Structure formats: C-alpha cells, structure tokens
Image: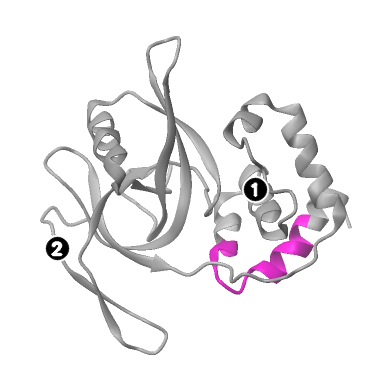
C-alpha cells in the first residue's frame, strides 16, 4: 500500500464513464463477511479504532474489509460501508458497538495514515437487485431456529425480516461457517440465483 494519501481516483461505470471517487473513510480490517442489512457486534479497544468510532458516530460510518490472516498488509479490494446502530460498555470495560451494513463498496488507493488507520477512497459496488425470487421454505425455518438458539443474534436484530427471501439468504450466508473466499463469490450483482441452490445443498444436503 502507498504511504502517501491520494485524494481522488477514477473508476468506471458499466458504460465506461469515469466517476470521481474523492470521499475517504477509515477501513477496519477484520475477517468478517457482512452484507447490506447485516449486523455485527464489534469490540473496540485500540486507541486508533476508538478514535475511528468517535468520528464514525457523527454520521460518516466506516468500512469493514477482510484482511489476509497471515499477511497484515494484504487488504481486499472491496468492503462494506457500515453505520453504528448501538453501543455499550461491556463488563470488562471494553467498548462494544453494533454496526449495520449499508452498502458494498470498491476500495481505491488505500493507504495507512499517520494515526495508524487504513483509509481509502471508495465507490458504491452494486449488489443483488430487488427480485421477487422464491426460496425453499426450509431457509426461513432454519434461520428462525438460529435466532431461537442464539440470544446474541436475536439482540442484534430486534425486527428480523423473515418474509424477505434476499434478507434470509444474506443472513444465512453471513452466519454459516463457509470460507470467506467462497462467500465473496456471492457479492456479485448476478450471484443470487446461484446462491439459492448453494444454500439449499448445505441446509438439506440435496
């Protein structure tokens, strides 16, 4: 990664028209897969990330991006822009925040700033279009059971949307023990139809 910040990069739309991406946000590198609408609880204790959270709480948010476990400088080229929806001080005096995915983003010109944070300009990355796609009823039943079995999940989602097939599939994909590399395949806009049989095979074995 470059050590010198670059304030503006250029990306291209499908039509080939360049779009300036000049806005920057802090990037929090974690081995977490989160899609729009998904929620995750994070424990924050490093001073640089406490400062990041303080700034994000003003409305800007930050970006979650996966990072290679063994090579700390190898950052993914995409992430999830998140907003803080709740926070709490845990019994061990560690700050806990609940974040919600807002949109997928493509990262451009990531760099490490003087405060130690990774920062990057970014552009919106399309995800699944809104489709009226029927999924097996077992999907919702399986997810409902996960909510019943895990109090931590129920607390993250006070108003779950068990009627929305895409919401159901997104939460299942996030929660299931599937390699990050495989999960990433389903961030593409056209990937939803192939996700359904993939999840069905895991849940039902068929």
**Magenta segment, principal secondary structure?**
helix
Image point 30% across, 62% down: which residue?
A: 122
**Above or below for 72 versus 156:** below
The secondary element bearing badge 2 is classed as loop
Image point 27% across, 29% down: which residue?
A: 50
User: Where does the N terminus fall, quadrant-wise?
Assistant: bottom left
Q: Is residue 161 left or right of residue 42?
A: right
Q: Is residue 55 left or right of residue 177?
A: left
Q: Residues within 10 Å of mark 2 (few under 14, many from 20)?
A: some
Please name the residue that numbered disc 2 is placed on.
Answer: 7
Query: Magenta segment: does it hold 38?
Result: no
Q: Is residue 155 left or right of residue 196?
A: left
Q: Which residues are magenta?
A: 185-199
- The percent coordinates of residue 131 (x first, y second) are 67, 71
Q: Quadrant of residue 7?
A: bottom left
- The percent coordinates of residue 9 (x first, y second) are 21, 71
**Above or below for 100 versus 195:** above
Tell which residue pokes out farthest to the top in this image: 91
Image point 75% across, 60% down: which residue?
A: 198
Sequence-first disc among 1 and 2? 2
- The percent coordinates of residue 73 (x first, y second) are 30, 48
Q: Residues within 10 Å of mark 1 (few under 14, many from 20)?
A: some
Please name the residue that numbered disc 1 is placed on.
Answer: 171
**Above or below for 91 versus 2:** above
Measure the C-alpha gap from mark 1 to mark 2.
34 Å
């Amino acid at each position: 990664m470059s050590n010198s910040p670059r304030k503006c990069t250029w990306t291209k739309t499908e039509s080939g028209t360049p779009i300036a991406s000049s806005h920057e946000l802090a990037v929090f590198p974690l081995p977490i897969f989160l899609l729009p609408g998904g929620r995750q609880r994070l424990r924050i204790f490093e001073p640089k990330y406490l400062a990041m959270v303080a700034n994000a709480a003003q409305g800007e948010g930050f970006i979650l991006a996966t990072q290679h476990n063994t090579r700390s400088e190898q950052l993914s080229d995409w992430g999830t822009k998140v907003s803080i929806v709740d926070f709490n001080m845990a019994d061990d005096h560690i700050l806990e925040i609940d974040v919600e995915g807002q949109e997928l983003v493509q990262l451009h010109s990531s760099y490490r700033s003087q405060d130690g944070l990774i920062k990057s300009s970014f552009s919106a990355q399309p995800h699944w279009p809104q489709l009226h796609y029927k999924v097996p009823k077992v999907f919702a039943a399986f997810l409902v059971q996960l909510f019943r079995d895990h109090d931590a999940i129920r607390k993250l989602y006070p108003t779950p949307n068990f009627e929305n097939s895409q919401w159901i599939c997104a939460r299942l994909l996030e929660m299931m023990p599937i390699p990050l590399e495989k999960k990433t395949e389903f961030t593409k806009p056209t990937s939803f139809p192939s996700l359904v049989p993939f999840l069905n095979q895991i849940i039902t074995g068929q």
